[in-house]
């Protein structure tokens, strides 16, 4: 039995409200984006249980309006606001579309961080920060080996296979 009023007399949300009615009680509409005020997961995506599945609030918004999400498609944001559930800010696309979209918006961290993929002198280990980091690790390793906190692991042929910290 579903009821039309999403709130109980005591002001709490009713479990018996229509899913769509209940859904929109979690949303605050701003002049641009409609923001999810319920549960969030990392990076600001809203979460709600819909059809027995805990899923992204933007996905639920899309499904309430359009029905099931086609296989292998994702619900993506035009506005780039993870908490946004405004229908005309959402569109469906493939994972590849999502990556392309994110690349176009300069949010693809792999592409936007040349140190991660550049070769030669541009590689992160050759950069100032990477070099100091490597030196610090090397010094620490030497010190651990000298003091016996770290032992060298050798195979049966006596070849060095790596080291291990003694605990
Ligand atoms: Zn939006």
Image: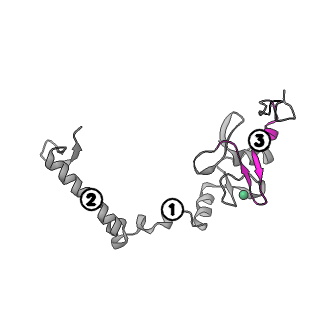
* Residue stretch rendered in magenta on the structure: 16-39
Residue 23 tag number: 3
Residue 166 position within the rendered picture, expressed as x and y whole percent measured from the top left: 21, 40
The residue identified by callout 1 is: 109
Separation of residues labelled 3 and 1 (CA atoms): 33 Å
- Compare residues 75 and 139 and report the one nearer the observer: 139
Q: Residue furthest top?
A: 1
Left or right, 38 with reference to 149: right
- Compare residues 87 and 25 and report the one nearer the observer: 25
* Label 3 beta carbon within 8 A of ligand 1: no
Q: Report the colour scheme.
A: one colour
Residue at screen point 36% across, 68% down = 123
Residue 55 position within the rendered picture, expressed as x and y whole percent measured from the top left: 66, 41
Q: Earlier in the sequence, mark 2 or mark 1?
A: 1
Mark 2 closeness class: few <14, some 14–19, many ≥20 residues within 10 Å: few
Image region (quadrant) for ligand 1: bottom right
The residue identified by callout 2 is: 136
**SS of the residue at dot 1?**
helix
Residue 93 position within the rendered picture, expressed as x and y whole percent measured from the top left: 67, 56
């Amino acid at each position: 039995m579903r009821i039309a009023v999403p709130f109980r007399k005591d002001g709490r949300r009713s479990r018996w409200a229509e899913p769509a009615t209940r859904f929109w009680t979690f949303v605050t509409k701003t002049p641009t984006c409609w923001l999810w005020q319920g549960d969030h997961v990392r990076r600001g995506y809203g979460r709600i249980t819909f059809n027995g599945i805990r899923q992204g609030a933007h996905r639920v918004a899309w499904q309430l309006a359009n029905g099931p999400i086609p296989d292998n498609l994702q619900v993506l944001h035009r506005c780039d606001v993870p908490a946004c559930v405004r229908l005309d800010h959402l569109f469906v696309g493939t994972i590849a579309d999502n990556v392309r979209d994110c690349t176009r918006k300069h949010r693809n961290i792999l592409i936007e961080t040349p140190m991660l993929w550049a070769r030669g002198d541009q590689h992160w280990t050759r950069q100032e920060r990477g070099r100091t980091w490597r030196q610090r690790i090397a010094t620490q390793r030497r010190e651990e080996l000298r003091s016996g906190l770290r032992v060298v692991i050798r195979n049966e042929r006596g070849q060095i296979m790596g080291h291990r910290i003694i605990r």
